[in-house]
Amino acid sequence: MSSEVIAEILAGIRSWVEIESQTGDRDGVNRMIDAVEQSYLALGARTERIAGRDGLGDHLRARLPWGGDGPGILLLSHVDTVHPKGTLERQPFRVEGDSAFGPGIYDMKGGTYIAFHALRELVHAGRATPLPVTHLITADEEIGSPTSRDLILAEGSTARYVLVTEPARESGKVVTARKGVARFTLKTVGRASHAGARHQDGRSAIREMAHLILALEGLTDYQRGITANVGLVEGGTGVNVVPAECRARVDFRLPSLAAVDELLAWMGALTPCDPDVRLEVEGGLDRPPFEKNAMTAALLEHARALAAEIGFVLEDTASGGGSDGNFLADSVPVLDGLGVDGQGAHTDHEQVYISSLLPRATLLRRLLETLT
């Protein structure tokens, strides 16, 4: 019987993986949202489509047919991936041993599907959960959730528990802390001049940016868990021209709100080395840190007891990457990394471990059945 259930789960995941849905491919994302919505409508769920904007796809809210509209359990998932359209042609779904491969299968169509499967099991068994359940499926998590953030915050404000189906970490660990993400764009504006005849008249925006890059990268502190990465730099108009403009984009990962406050104060006080060069800074906190607290620790212990009943040991870890759970972790118990186990997120060898599908789906179902 369990082999039949596993085969059904894998077939469902495959059907979603074979709908390509890179974040910027609005049509592809909306085809994926169509598939999820039709699956939920077949269960008798109430669905609401939230129209996308800024060229991005739609979001979907599905409420199960029990429990009313009071505070309950919020399942958070996303269906957008980082893989551009056409990836499936060179990276088709395939099974090798205990691994199933495909673009977005691990991050996070597998997790989104097992959440649906857990709810379908409850509906088919005629078992209502003690709390109402809402499954929010978003379309833009991979680029920082710019159009879904307000929706996530609104749903989270009335939730008693939040379960995030991002992929599990090493050996099936759930996530109880994540770093916050801050992103800035810096622009230096100098003065152009001929690089040979009038070099002394120029004020190099690139040279100024080089000083700033060293200062920014110098904020990395591995002991404190702080990293700074200047990932994109562009500037100048020609090798024989002193460059008048330069831009750089920097990504910070921050483990605590205290570290966020320090960074924002540092960035606010940043000034150019050359007084003849102007510095412009845009950006700020993209996702707040998800710090493990007593609420999340208690939810973890509940999940551990359920996992032990199912037959596996559940451990937790912290992650350097952010998720939509970051937005809610300071106000409601959040357990993240409840999706499938596997490896290779965002790569051509992205895969899920087939043996993890049923235990992870069962854990989600048991959480829905027992949280009160």
Image: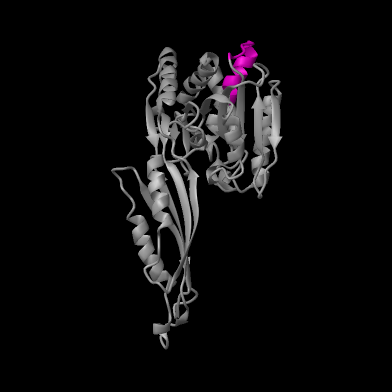
Could you tell me if residue 337 is visible in this image?
Answer: yes
Residue furthest toward the left?
A: 223
* Residue 205 x, y percent position in the rendering: 44, 71
Where residue 123 sits, quadrant-wise, is top right
Residue furthest toward the bottom?
A: 197
* Residue 74 x, y percent position in the rendering: 57, 26
Q: Which of 13 and 25 is in front in this view?
A: 25
Determine whether 35 is above or below 9 in the image: below
Q: Does the magenta stretch include residue 275?
A: no
Please report the residue visible at 58 percent of the width from the left and 35 percent of the height from the top: 152
Name the side, left or right, on which 21 lies relative to 227. Answer: right
Residues shaded magenta:
116-130
Please report the residue visible at 40 percent of the width from the left and 30 percent of the height from the top: 292
Determine whether 83 is above or below 326 in the image: below
* Residue 67 x, y percent position in the rendering: 64, 16
* Residue 202 x, y percent position in the rendering: 43, 80
Q: Nearer the viewer, residue 103 or 94?
A: 103
Could you tell me if residue 101 is visible in this image?
Answer: no
Total marks shown come to 0
* SS assignment for the magenta stretch, majority: helix
Indicate the colouring scheme. Answer: one colour
Please report the residue visible at 57 percent of the width from the left and 30 percent of the height from the top: 157
Determine whether 145 is above or below 95 in the image: below
Where residue 308 sits, quadrant-wise, is top left
Q: Quadrant of the N terminus?
A: top right
Q: Is residue 129 magenta?
A: yes
Name the side, left or right, on which 184 lies relative to 25. Answer: left
Where residue 18 sits, quadrant-wise, is top right
